[in-house]
Image: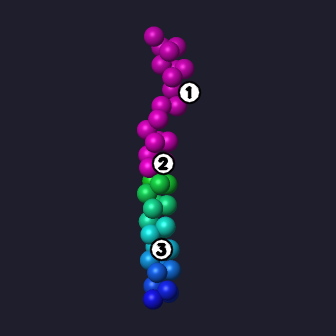
Amino acid sequence: MRDSNFWFYTIMIIVIAHFVVGFGYLIYKLSPKKEDKKKNNDQK
């Protein structure tokens, strides 16, 4: 019984970490970069 709990928690930690990294990556990719803001301000 204790061995199956170890694998259950290990897999759940990996899945949760995968979601956290995925959301972090999406936020990083969707956030506007500082360079883009400067270029947009110069064009106005």
- The residue that disc 3 covers is 9
**Residues tagged 1 and 3 counted as in contact (Cβ below 8 A):** no
Type of amino acid at the residue the image marks with label 3: Tyr
How packed mark 1 is, by other alpha carbons closer than 10 Å (few <14, some 14-19, many 20 or more), is few
Q: Which residue is mark 1?
A: 35
Q: Earlier in the sequence, mark 2 or mark 3?
A: 3
Above or below: residue 44 compared with residue 18: above
**Magenta span: helix, strand or loop, mainly?**
helix
Residue 41 versus residue 28: which sits nearer the camera? 28
Tell me the magenta residue range.
23-44
Q: Is residue 20 above or below residue 2?
A: above
Q: Give how far apart the Cα atoms at labels 1 and 3 are.
A: 42 Å
The residue depicted at 49 percent of the width and 86 percent of the height is 2
| Crowdedness near tag 2: few (<14), some (14–19) or many (≥20) residues, C-alpha within 10 Å | few
What amino acid is found at the position of numbered circle 2 in the picture? Tyr
**Residue 42 part of the magenta-drawn span:** yes
Q: Residue at x 54, y 20 (%)?
A: 38
Q: Secondary structure at mark 3?
A: helix
Helix or strand or loop: what does disc 2 sit on? helix
Give the numbered dot on residue 12.
none
Image coordinates of residue 22 in percent, x first then y, are 45, 53
